[in-house]
Structure formats: C-alpha cells, structure tokens
Image (cartoon, rainbow, N blue to C red):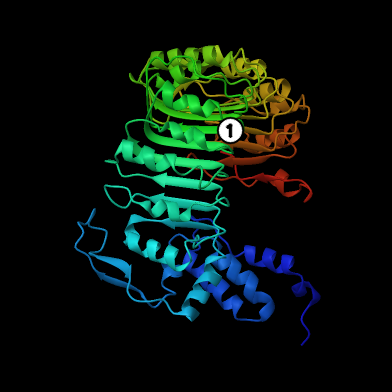
Amino acid sequence: MATPRAFEIPEIIYLIFEQFTVPPLSCNPRSKRNKTLARSARVCKAFAEPALDILWRDLVSIQPLLQILPTYTRICSSEPIPTKLIPDDVWVMDGAIHVTDWERFKTYAQRIRSIKLSQYDRIAASVYTALYRHNGERLILPLLRFFSWEQMSETFNNTLEFFMSPELRGLHLRLQRDALTNEFERLLSGLPPLAPNVAELYIKGDIQRCPPSVGSFPRMRRVEINFCRLNAESLHPLSLLENLTDINIAEARVQTILPRIGQFSMLTCLQLRFDGFSGTSLLRAMTLPRLRSLVLDFIPEAPSLDRLREIMTDVAEACTKYPSLRSLSIRRKSSLSGRRGESVLKIVQPLLEFCELEEVNLQYGRTRMDIADHNMRAIARAWPHLTCFSLSCLPNPSAPTVGTLVAFSKSCPDLKHLTLPLMTHKHDIHELLTSPPAPHGLRSLKFLWGPRLYQSPQALAQYLLRMFPNIILRYNKPVYGRLLDCPSTKDASHDQNYLVDGMY
C-alpha cells in the first residue's frame, strides 16, 4: 500500500503528533500520551523521528534519559533524608560508559528542550560531573531551552551550571525555605555569562533579599519572584533591563516606604501579590510609562471595607502615573467585614476616573456589596471603552436586574465579555418586549450564582437574544430552580454562537 503523500511532508506529521501532547493538569495522564507516541514511532520510518522528537521534547524528570546508561545505578545513601517522601537511596554512575550506550544517550539528549531536576529524583551530583567529563566538558543537553531546578540540599553545588547554555530561554529556580542567601547570590551571579539569552526567570524561596544579579540577564523579558524580601537595591537592576516587559512579584516582603526606583521603560504587565499596603508602596516607587496591564492580589491588614476603600484610593493615586494602562485586575478572595450592603460604587469610585480602561476584573470573594442597577449603571458610564468586565461579590441587599444589562449595552459598545454575581427580575418581562433593544455584540454573559427569575423566564431569554444575538450564557452554580427549555434558542441559525443553558 502506497504511503499517502501528506505523510511525506515532515511538517504535517509533526502537527499530527502535536495533538498527543496534553496540558499537565489534563485528565489524560502523561504516561498514556507517552505510550501513544512510543507506539507511533514504531509504525514506520516516516513516523519515527517526529514521534521521538515530541516524546523526548519535554521531560518532567531526567531519569528516563539517565536510565539509558547501564552504569547508572541506585545504591543506599548515608546522606540525611530531607523528607519522608524521599527514599533512602541515591543514583550514581558505577563503572565506565560503553561507546554504543553513549551514542544512544546523545541521540536522545539532543531531542530534549525542557527538563526538570527535582530533589525527589535523588541523583548524586557526581553523576552530572561524570557525564560532563565523558562528553569532553561539553553540555550534555546542548539544545535545552527551558530548565527547572530544585535545591537538593542545604548547601549549593555546581549541578546547575551543567545545564546552562546560550540556547536556554527559561530558568525556574525553587529553593528550600532555609536557603542561604549569600550562597544563592554567588550561584546566580555566575549564570548570566553561561546563559546570556534567558528571557524568563522564576525564583521561589525564603531568602532574605532578591539577588541584584537578577538584573544581569541582558535579554530578560519576564521575571517572577516569590517569597523574597524586596528593597530598592534589589529592584533597581531590573529597571536597567531594556527588554523587560512582564514582572510578577508574589507573596514577597516589601519595605513600607520605598525610595524612587528607576524607570521601567518597556514594562507592559505588572502583577503583585502582597499583604497590606506593601504593594501600593511599590506602585508609587516605580515609573511605568508603558504599563498596560496591572494585576493586584492582596490581603488587607485589617479585613474591613474601610481598609479596602483606602487601598482603592492608593491604587488610583499610583495609576495616575500610568497613561497607557488599559487592563486592571484587583482580586481579594476572602470576605471582608463592614456595614451591611456597602455600595460597590463607593468602593470603586477612585478608579472611575480612568475612563480609558478596556478590561476590568474586580474580585471581592464573598464580601457583601450593594450592586443595584443604579450602581452598575454608573460603573458602565464611567468605563465606555470596556471590552471585558467581571465583578465577583455577594449581592446584599440588592442585585442587578435586566436594567444593568441594558446599561452596559448602551454605554459600552465594544463589550465582549461580561461577568456578574447574579441577576434577578421580579417584574413582568413582557413590558420590556414592547421596546425591543438595539442588538449588541456581547459574546459571553456569565452569572457566578445563576439567575433568579420570578416571572416569564422564557420571555427574558427571548429579550436577551434580541439584545445580544451572539450570546453565550453561562452560570456556575445552578442550584436555584429548575432548568427551562427555551424554544427561542433552538431555532437560532447554526452560523451564530448560541448557547443558553437555562433560565430560572
């Protein structure tokens, strides 16, 4: 049987086998995907190379590669065990490596683009030294582009340096909580000359300060820092990076008052996760002329709505220096205490002056707020350029009605995605049908708690489809009533993206 001509084109075969790759959190286990690729590599010569390239491209452990060598063996270790999850043994190289085994090892090593070294692998540092020397002091993974490394002992060794190369683009470093700051700084300071093209750096560890050498990677575009103490000295080198566009600082300890930090001329995205007011102090200290996206996750020192208003005021004051800001996300997951039915308009009032915002995401968890129609109408009028708006809270005492949807459709002509806590309607919807709304281009309408409808749910579905002809209606918690089958959604054209799950 002749081979189809399409299979003679390597690019097509690679695209086919790419479909076997799955995200790490997918329900399809990685082992099942690997077995499929391994079987595909044995089908024919045309499949062998593409399937093996994808099979070996991304490894969550280096063990499969090292186990190609028969001299790679496991012995009992006398080293202290960091945790009970780590077995009382260690992998070492025992004996000389045969030429045939080494050639096979190099064949697969050249396919690897992403790999992770974990402390649970229990690989002795002498293994990497032996492989490095056997390879003529050349890198064992010459085409590696992404490397994730976990500190394997209370002290640092030179294991990390064996994987640094000009091809490397992403570097993730995870440190033990008792990591030695000075030793880590010395280790990190030696990496930029070995891997000058790193564009993404992630550091997670309980160290006393962020190493200034973080700013020594000339082509750095994204930096993420977790559990570090930040000050002006450690942040200033980042402002010197000409290509830096994205900073993510999470759960770090920041000085309450920071001096002015240099200008981040190319930064477009900033994400901060802090306790109290440390995040706003950092915002005031940074100069960000091109910032377009700002994400703030915070935990107020005093969990109250008054404290929340103060934070909103500080954020608004800092954002006056960001003329290019178009996307703002403020997230607070747990509930806040305060007066019953506090107006959401009073909380976000300081932010309404930024009328050029296109994406706004306000997540206040289970905090009770008054989100009645008049409050939501004021928000819609203040942000006429919205393309995406999301609000998460508990409505108390008032919830929005159809009037809120009408307000957004009139005030925000470019709105594509709208998320509200819920919607309620107690009046006869047929009154609205006497004045049909103008069609709007909204694509997605989501209710976090499901609509609460007391009269004419089918008529409301018809009204929504007139106002939003391309709508996808979703809700997260359908627990308020029975599903209704809406005939108006069944007669829709297949060319339009209709999906109305149900009305209550």
**Quadrant in which residue 326 is drawn:** top right
Circle count:
1
Q: Quadrant of the N terminus?
A: bottom right
Could you tell me the amino acid type at mark 1?
Leu
Image location (x, y in percent) of residue 377: 63, 17
Image location (x, y in percent) of residue 422: 53, 31
Q: Which residue is drawn at the image coordinates 47% and 55% (left, top)?
A: 163
In the rendered view, tell whether residue 116 sits above or below residue 192. Answer: below
Image location (x, y in percent) of residue 185: 38, 37
Q: Which residue is drawn at the image coordinates 43% and 52% (left, top)?
A: 161
**Quadrant in which residue 79 is drawn:** bottom left
In the rendered view, tell whether residue 56 sits above or below residue 502. Answer: below
Q: Which residue is drawn at the image coordinates 58% and 71% (left, top)?
A: 52
Comparing 307 with 66, the one in front is 66
Comparing 248 with 376, the one in front is 248
Q: Which residue is drawn at the image coordinates 57% and 42% (left, top)?
A: 199
Identity of the residue furthest to the bottom in this view: 1
Comparing 229 with 366, the one in front is 229
Image location (x, y in percent) of residue 487: 70, 46
Q: Quadrant of the C terminus?
A: top right
Can residue 361 be spotted in the picture?
Answer: no
In the rendered view, tell whether residue 71 sits above or below residue 439. Answer: below
Can residue 167 be spotted in the picture?
Answer: yes
**Residue for badge 1:** 244
Helix, strand, or loop for circle 1?
Answer: loop
Q: Is residue 449 left or right of residue 304?
A: right
In the rendered view, tell whether residue 143 sits above or below residue 209. Answer: below
Comparing 409 with 190, the one in front is 190
Category of crowding for the residue at label 1, using alpha-carbon neighbours closer than 10 angstroms: few (below 14), some (14–19), many (at least 20): many
Q: Is residue 460 left or right of residue 270?
A: right
